[in-house]
Image (cartoon, helix red, strand yellow):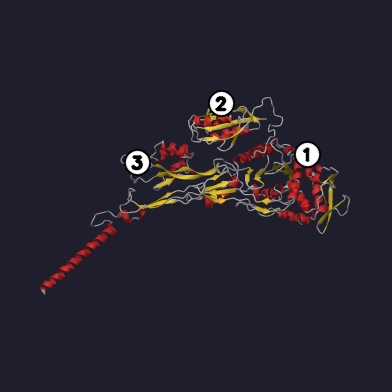
Amino acid sequence: MRQSNRMILLILATILLISTLVTANVFLVAVVKVHARSGTDLTDYVSASNVHRTVQQARRGYILDRNGTIIAQDNVTYNIIAILDKNRQSRKGEIAYVDDPLATARALAPILGMEESTLYGYLTKSAKQVELGSKGRNLPRETKEAIEALDLNGIEFVQTTKRSYPLGTFASYLIGFAQADDDGEVSGRMGIEQYMNAALSGEDGYKRYQADKNGNILPGMKMEEKSAVNGNDVILTLDQGIQEALETAFMQTQAEFNPEKVWGSVMEVETGKILAWGQSPSFDPNTMNIDDYVNYVSQMPYEPGSTMKVFTYAAAIDSGAYDGSVLVDSSRFCYAATNRKPYRVSQGDSRKIGCIGNASGKSWGMIPYDLGLVYSSNVVTASIITNLIEPSVYEEYLDRFGFFKLVDTDGIAESTGVKNFTWPADKLALTYGQGSTVTMLQMIQAYSAIFNDGTMVKPYVIDQVRSSYDDQNVLYQGQTQVVGNPISVETSRQVQQLMYDTANREDGTARFYQIPETTIIAKTGTTQLAAVGGGGYSTGKTIVSLMAAMPAEDPKVLVYYAFQADYDKNAHVKSDAIKSVLRKVAMTYNFAGQQDVSEPGAPSAEIVPIHESTMPSLINHTLTYAQNKLADSECDVIVLGGGEEIIDQFPQAGEMVVTRQKVFLLTDTYQITMPDMNGWTRKEVSGFWKASGLPVKIEGYGKVISQNIPPGTLVNKQTAIEVVLQE
């Protein structure tokens, strides 16, 4: 019995001891953070602050033109981090925090372009670490290296990315831009960047693990990891060469007419592929110097003027009521109306409610209806809907052509315009493109039917979406979309013939737009600009426009160009800017054939055989390799920099080059010497600009007659290069 009691006491003592040990271990783990048996410090294991998560940033997809030229891309940049925590661990003998805020501010101020006082304010904050504001973010590698060379205590960098646009203002209202929010997440805010944001955006990856105070992964803890997935690439239908020709024409128009607005577009008429799209003033998405967010091509309704007359003729021809040889009185057109339907009356008729005249008050007497389009007569188009067809028939055809409705092109923001077709004056005015408003996007869609045998196609700009990992993996393919057949093949061809006469007869209103490469068909427009809020058309301003297509015998590409400026009676005579776009299109599509492509009036003392070749890909190759590859092209090769390897080229790979064309090869950005530009064309100066990245101020047109920097001078991005051109 006594032995049993002892056994019970022993068991109870053992249980009590074990309980005490367990309680003590729990206390040590829970409170002291030490494992009793091993003596391991568990602080790092139980502290949530020691859970580390690092983000692997995904790359946003490229936006490229149809030839693979990069329009938008992510660039690696750096953000400055200033460590202010004096207790931060560091290696022996080193200081890992900003120990002298004033000296640090003085050193950084000139590099970052900031005031010392502003920087000093950041560096003396009560915080463990700080960023240095917007000017301390998205720094290029060169700036980072310049700061690192100062060996400043506590100044560190975090790698990040910034959306960049290598071609600057290139189609910027169409491309739009992407920006980072306050959390650093980049998303599209305008244009293609916004519409295609889901396709372009990648998915960031991460690493998640628990570490000790020195950043080492704790024993027994696993790392959770997810790889970043880059965004997809978007390939557009735009053509770099044609787009740049359009934007160069904008600059020339600005210099010649001082317009308030210029806008234009180029499109394949059979496919609907948009080759160029732009406006001026524009903006550079790299600097965001944007004041106006309106996309003129799709969001700015305007009165199109005489380019609308083509649809008046198309409606009359297609409805079977037209005989172009019938004579019509082209003198001043006065009208009365019954039930809001206008009809012509004499000037002295008491029923008269208004009169219409031709531009500049011209009259050609009795002329065939066909010449009404060739001469761009307002009176003749007014006669068409009073003598040949009912106004309601014309209205029906405008609906067939898609006017006053959304075109719905690849998510591009757009307006519908306003149709005024209630009163007799409205109905007559719309026959020659006044009183109602349309958009350029509607116009190029409608004109596709005129040039494409009656088949109307929707304009589009997104050609493909491809995987950024495999360019053979096409996730989306743009397609030609037929949106109607508003007129017959016969009507289309008859209207084309009238537009041929308009551009090629000696008395045609579009004769000043003829180019040597190919024959065009065209229609001009000169629209009086209405006063804002009413008040008629006495503003003294006009919208000058041209719709052209080529080649005349089988139209493939249309060019539509317009600008708003003070009235100039010779606006269509001063046609060089627009002709430069027409010529670029003709050369790009090789419409020249066997025609003489020399400039009209150019000297022909020396006949040089001209041949074309394709520009090879030379980037990352040696200079010797590049010169050998270009030997047969007979181009004028200009090497920029003192390096041995090509880091950029102009023209880009795949573009056509011709005999004696200047080709620029960039080998480094530190040893560029100023070339002798005497006699260079604007295009050649622009080529130097694009290849070198050095800004050049260009004044005038023609060829270079002077430059402010002597040839052979070392130049860099801070050099103010100016050249003067003269015809």
Q: Secondary structure at mark 3?
A: loop
Marks 1 and 2 sit apart, C-alpha to C-alpha, by: 48 Å
Question: From this viewpoint, which residue is outermost toward the top?
Answer: 605
Q: Which mark is residue 95?
A: 3
Q: Is residue 428 above or below residue 667?
A: below
Marks 1 and 3 sit apart, C-alpha to C-alpha, by: 83 Å
**Three-letter code, disc 2:** Pro
Question: From this viewpoint, which residue is outermost toward the left?
Answer: 2
Picture coordinates of residue 28 (x, y %)? 26, 58
Q: Quadrant of the C terminus?
A: top right
Structural crowding at the residue carrying mark 1, measured as other residues with C-alpha within 10 Å and reported as few (<14), some (14–19) or many (≥20): few
Can residue 721 be seen by looking at this rendering? no
Cβ–Cβ under 8 Å for marks 3 and 2: no
Q: Is residue 684 left or right of residue 141?
A: right
Q: Is residue 363 above or below residue 30?
A: above
Q: Quadrant of the N terminus?
A: bottom left
For label 2, the residue is 711
Q: Nearer the viewer, mark 1 or mark 3?
A: 1
**Three-letter code, disc 1:** Arg
Q: Which mark is residue 505?
A: 1
Front in this rendered view, residue 36 or 682: 682
Picture coordinates of residue 543 (x, y %)? 71, 44
First in sequence: mark 1 or mark 2?
1
**Three-letter code, disc 3:** Ile
Count of numbered marks: 3
